[in-house]
Image (cartoon, helix red, strand yellow):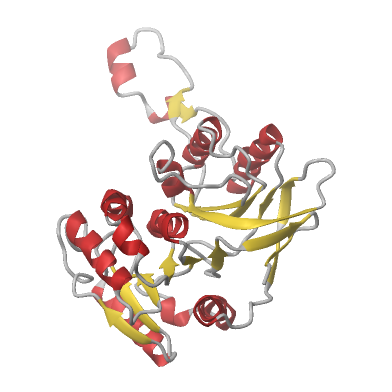
Amino acid sequence: MIRIGIVATSSVVPKVEFEIGVNFLKSKGFEIDVHPKVLGESMFYPAPDAERAEALIEMALRKDLNAIWCARGGYGATHLLPMLNRAKNKLKRAPKKTLLGYSDATALLEWFRVNLGWQTIHAPMPSLRTFSLLPENEWHSVESLLQYSVKQAKAPKAEFKLEPLHVPKGFAQVEAPLVGGNLFVWNSLLGTPDQGQARGKILFLEEISENLGRVNRMMHHLEQAGGLKGVKALVLGEFLDCVDTVPSCLMTGPEPGVDLESFLCQPPKDAMGPLRTLHSPEVAFDFIFKGVGERNRIPVFKGVPVGHGPHHHSLYLGKKHRLTKKGGFNLKG
């Protein structure tokens, strides 16, 4: 039986949703141990940074656990990295485990993969409201990867069919380890001692509720800061509720005799209009990421059914994946 420890590393955990998710895991035959700090509240978090780090380290050191699953995302996981670095030598002596999570847990997945050689799975978390309602193929996605990571069971053979945004001349296929996760979190690690290690790898990115102008800015920052240097390919998951927004501006000036100050401070509604064309998410998305591929001469594909929804498939980070010119994308067992 696989025994899983659950910790809260980011935002406050919703009690009802979480308990439903834990009961679902138990119904699937997993033995679950929830850390006492999971359901607390301290400002934005379940517990102060030091206590959340201590809980994670405590679980990591235990010899009776096969895996650790983050309860939920949100924000705050990056605050734990300095404390994990200070405990690194102690953690290296502990049995290696599998770490599961996504979103804000992106930073932890990369840290444990790089520093401790843990198995890491980008997976939905127990406090997700619909965790117990995952379609069978999505639940099988995470369950099979967990079984594979812990018991070295047979590698899942699922293949995703992706859509090309940019395919460099001569590209046929690439086989390389897969890394990445949430775009904002991955981007926020740039310039820190714990920034993501994507050189020589396939980089996966997903996002939720970000203005597409901000997504464009983040991608340019990732590029200009060297975060795409040596990347073999870019594969994109779901960008849920990422839409274009346009500020309003004056379309007409004041009529003769109208007080200019009043007009500028409280312009009539019929004098206002959009600054520019409002672009559909599809058009803006393709513009942003096709440009990334062209400038960096790397293949870019979209359509990985992984992220904040509507699909919640899982990915085995750190393991070699194959990406073909026709968009075939799968784990190499």
Where is residue 85? Give x, y as percent: 31, 51
Decide: is 181 above or below 272.
below
Whether residue 173 is visible = yes
Is 157 on the left-hand or right-hand side of 65? right
Front in this rendered view, residue 81 or 117: 117
Image quadrant occupied by the C terminus: bottom right
Does 46 appear above or below 266?
below
| Residue 112 x, y percent position in the rendering | 41, 59
- How many numbered discs, if any? 0
Which residue ends up furthest to the top in the rendered image? 257
Q: Position of residue 203 (x, y in %)?
A: 59, 51
- Please indicate whether residue 34 sits to the left or right of residue 160 in the image: left
Q: Residue at x 37, y 75 (%)?
A: 126
Compare residues 261 and 325 and report the one nearer the observer. 325
- Image point 33% across, 17% down: which residue? 263
Position of the N terminus, as image quadrant, is: bottom left
Name the residue: 44% across, 15% down: 253
In the image: residue 157, left or right of residue 7: right
Determine if residue 19 is in view.
no
**Residue 289 position (above or below residue 295):** below
Residue 89 in the image, given as x and y percentages of width and height: 32, 57
